[in-house]
Structures are given as structure tokens and as C-alpha cells.
């Protein structure tokens, strides 16, 4: 997984909390910085795709690692 | 005029389960950049109380999943027993907490943080003689015409 600037562990949280926490964290970051998110909600895979499309933050990577879902989002 | 998308929601229900859709959708929409307003009317006004004391009822709701085959042990009439609603409510809350589902106060706080406008129906407040001191801060009071001013410009409008 590529480098990132900040990390958010949303494990155990259910919809819509991973998205809301990610949004909040991104709000405090500068444009171009990368956020690494870890989630256990299987719905978060589609949700982070949709979130990125609608907010102009780039979803650089989305993968499953040992039953957890990991995302890299670059702030737009 | 802003070029943000707009979401208008009418929240009419005051039970624990039905309190979720307005707050989930409004908080998520805000995270996606929507300008969002919820208009609370009739039983939906319960969702504005500082002390959220909402319950869930299995009565009149054959779609509600019942734990431990309770629907077999307690057919409809059994569900009217005193204490049943309180028990179902506490089981539902435990279940939600164990699944990482946000609590209602948390979701409502997130809505307020995200500047979702919470509007209470003045008519219903008067009708039920509700004490607005019991409501959270930041609530606006208005009527149907004010709702349409926002909803008429909205991209999505939901009645819940």
C-alpha cells in the first residue's frame, strides 16, 4: 500500500459512520494529502466509491486485507 | 443562491427505528456536500427532544425480526403485554450498539455539526402543547410555506 499522511480506523463502525468520520478527518487535511481508512463494514466498499465520486476526493486504492477493508483517499 | 445540491426531508415518525432514516440520510448527505434541511412534524417532533426517550414496538409491524423466535411464543396479543415494548426497545438498542450502529444522539449531533437545518413544525408544537424548552438548541420554528421555500429548490425531497 502506498504512503499516506493520516490514518482513520473505522473498524466496528456501521453505516454511515465510516463515511462521516472520513469526511471529518478529510476536512482537517490539506489538498493532495492522503488518508488511509480501515473499516469492517462490507457496505463501505461501495460507499467509499460513491463518496469519492460525489466529493471530488480521489479513491486511489480499495482492497480487502484479512477481512478488513482498506482505502486510500487523496483529498481533492 | 448556492450551487450545492439540496436535500429536504420531512420526518413524521417518533419511534426509535424510524428516527434513524432522517438522521442517517441527512448526515450522509451533508458529508457529500448537500445543503440539508429536516422538517419535523407530528410525532417526528419527538426526535428534537434533548432527552431522546424513543421506543420501538413490534405491534402492527409483522416485518420486525424477533429474537429467539419470540413471535412464535408471543403471537400478536402477547406483544401487548405490559413491559413488552420496553423489552423490545432495550434489545434493539443492545443489538444496534453491538453492530456498531451509531446512537441517535450521536447521529443528531453529527447532523448539527454538519449544519443540517432542523426545523420544527410550529403548528404541531402548538397542537400538542409541546414544551420547546425540552428541545435541543438550534431548532428553527416554521410552517409549511417555509418548508416549500427550501423544498421547492431541492434536488431530493423525502417524506419519512
Image (spheres, rainbow, N blue to C red):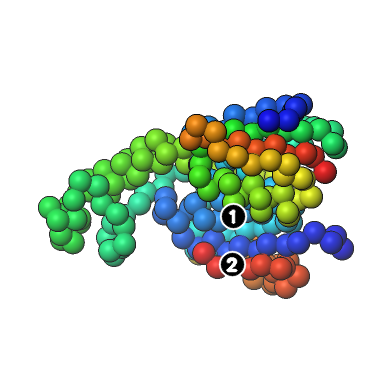
In front of the other: B39 or B72: B72
Q: What residue do we see at 77% from left, 39% from top?
A: A74
Give the Cα distance between marks 2 and 1: 10 Å
Of callouts 2 and 1, the N-terminal one: 1
- Confirm whether residue A42 shows in the render: yes
Q: Where is residue B87 in the image (x, y as percent from the top left)?
A: 26, 43
What chain is tagged by disc 1? B
Are circles 2 and 1 on residues that touch, CB within 8 Å?
yes
Q: Which numbered disc covers residue A40?
A: none
Q: In this view, does A23 lie above or below B12?
A: above
List the residue tagged with mark 1: B25
Q: Residue furthest left?
A: B73
Q: What residue do we see at 50% from left, 45% from top?
A: A42
Q: How many badges with numbers are in the image?
A: 2
The kind of secondary structure element at disc 2 is strand
List the residue tagged with mark 2: B158
Amino acid at each position: 500500500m502506498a504512503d499516506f499522511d493520516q490514518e482513520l480506523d473505522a473498524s466496528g463502525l456501521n453505516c454511515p459512520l465510516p463515511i462521516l468520520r472520513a469526511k471529518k478527518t478529510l476536512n482537517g487535511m490539506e489538498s493532495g494529502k492522503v488518508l488511509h481508512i480501515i473499516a469492517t463494514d462490507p457496505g463501505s466498499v461501495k460507499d467509499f466509491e460513491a463518496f469519492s465520486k460525489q466529493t471530488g476526493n480521489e479513491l486511489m486504492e480499495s482492497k480487502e486485507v484479512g477481512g478488513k477493508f482498506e482505502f486510500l483517499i487523496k483529498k481533492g | 443562491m448556492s450551487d450545492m445540491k439540496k436535500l429536504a426531508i420531512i420526518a413524521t415518525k417518533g419511534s426509535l427505528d424510524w428516527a434513524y432514516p432522517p438522521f442517517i440520510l441527512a448526515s450522509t448527505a451533508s458529508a457529500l456536500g448537500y445543503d440539508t434541511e429536516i422538517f419535523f412534524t407530528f410525532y417526528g417532533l419527538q426526535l428534537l427532544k434533548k432527552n431522546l426517550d424513543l421506543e420501538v414496538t413490534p405491534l402492527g409491524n409483522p416485518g420486525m425480526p424477533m429474537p429467539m423466535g419470540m413471535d412464535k411464543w408471543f403471537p400478536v396479543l402477547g406483544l401487548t403485554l405490559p413491559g413488552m415494548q420496553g423489552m423490545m426497545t432495550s434489545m434493539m438498542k443492545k443489538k444496534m450498539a453491538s453492530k456498531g450502529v451509531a446512537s441517535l444522539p450521536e447521529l443528531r449531533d453529527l447532523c448539527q455539526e454538519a449544519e443540517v437545518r432542523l426545523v420544527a413544525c410550529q403548528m404541531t408544537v402548538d397542537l400538542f402543547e409541546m414544551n420547546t424548552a425540552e428541545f435541543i438548541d438550534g431548532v428553527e420554528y416554521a410552517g409549511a410555506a417555509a418548508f416549500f421555500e427550501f423544498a421547492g429548490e431541492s434536488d431530493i425531497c423525502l417524506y419519512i
